[in-house]
């Protein structure tokens, strides 16, 4: 473990595949651009419909159920911490394939089954520490849009968020088959 070189990246979405391929576990990311939130209900809904009503492939997926407050016609983000990613594992392979996303942000990691999909579709999973809801909210510049609010409710709706220097995120599953979670389990 000692002597490893860990890189720090400040990236703007969308991120090109050649950059995704360079990212390795333990790298630190700060991202700027647009991301969208989706928990299990939003995943299920987007997998059922023919066309997703926003340009999904240019954004990062954030496993998050934010707390929002309406101010006139605009939304203010109160808290936007990550939610447990393993809840979305059942849908993630099909979702990555359909959407073309290449960066997933969440908490707690996913199981090794998703690792094959990350390799196949050149995608990485980055962890955001739990309990950082207020810090995450500070990095969100603007709520661009919301989809399925009435149908799914606030935490399950899909929120399109403009972020600046969102992080620190830790690459914990890379597109080469490496996983901090697998490595941790091997050392036990």
Image (tube, helix red, strand yellow):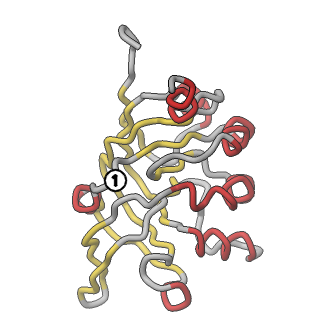
SS under mark 1: loop
**Crowding near the residue tagged with mark 1, few <14, some 14–19, many ≥20 C-alpha atoms within 10 Å:** few
At horizontal 75% and vertical 75% (from top left) the residue drawn is 48
In this view of the protein, which residue sits in the foreground, 63 or 30? 63
Residue 54 at x, y percent in the picture: 58, 70
Residue 88 at x, y percent in the picture: 60, 60
Q: State left or right for residue 97 relative to residue 2.
A: right
In this view of the protein, which residue sits in the foreground, 55 or 102? 102
Q: Which residue is mark 1?
A: 130
At horizontal 53% and vertical 35% (from top left) the residue drawn is 181
The image quarter in which residue 43 lies: bottom right
Residue 148 at x, y percent in the picture: 54, 83
Q: Which residue ends up furthest to the front in the rendered image?
A: 188
Q: In the rendered image, which quarter contains the N terminus?
A: top left
51 relative to 90, above or below = below
At horizontal 60% and vertical 45% (from top left) the residue drawn is 102
Q: State left or right for residue 17 relative to residue 133.
A: right
Q: State left or right for residue 186 relative to residue 9.
A: right
2 relative to 138, above or below = above
Residue 161 at x, y percent in the picture: 40, 65
In this view of the protein, which residue sits in the foreground, 93 or 107? 107
Q: Which residue ends up furthest to the top in the rendered image?
A: 3
């Amino acid at each position: 473990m000692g002597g490893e070189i860990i890189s720090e990246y400040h990236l703007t979405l969308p991120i090109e595949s050649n950059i995704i391929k360079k990212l390795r576990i333990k790298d630190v990311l700060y991202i700027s651009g647009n991301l969208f939130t989706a928990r299990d209900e939003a995943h299920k809904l987007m997998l059922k419909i023919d066309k997703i009503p926003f340009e999904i492939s240019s954004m990062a997926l954030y496993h998050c159920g934010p707390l929002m407050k309406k101010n006139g016609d605009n939304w203010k983000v109160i808290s936007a911490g990550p939610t447990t990613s393993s809840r979305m594992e059942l849908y993630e392979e099909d979702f990555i394939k359909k959407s073309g996303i290449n960066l997933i942000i969440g908490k707690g990691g996913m199981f090794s089954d998703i690792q094959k999909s990350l390799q196949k579709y050149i995608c990485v999973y980055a962890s955001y520490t739990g309990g950082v809801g207020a810090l995450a909210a500070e990095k969100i510049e603007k709520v661009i849009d919301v989809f399925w609010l009435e149908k799914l409710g606030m935490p399950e709706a899909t929120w399109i968020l403009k972020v600046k220097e969102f992080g620190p995120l830790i690459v914990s599953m890379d597109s080469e088959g490496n996983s901090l979670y697998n490595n941790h389990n091997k050392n036990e």
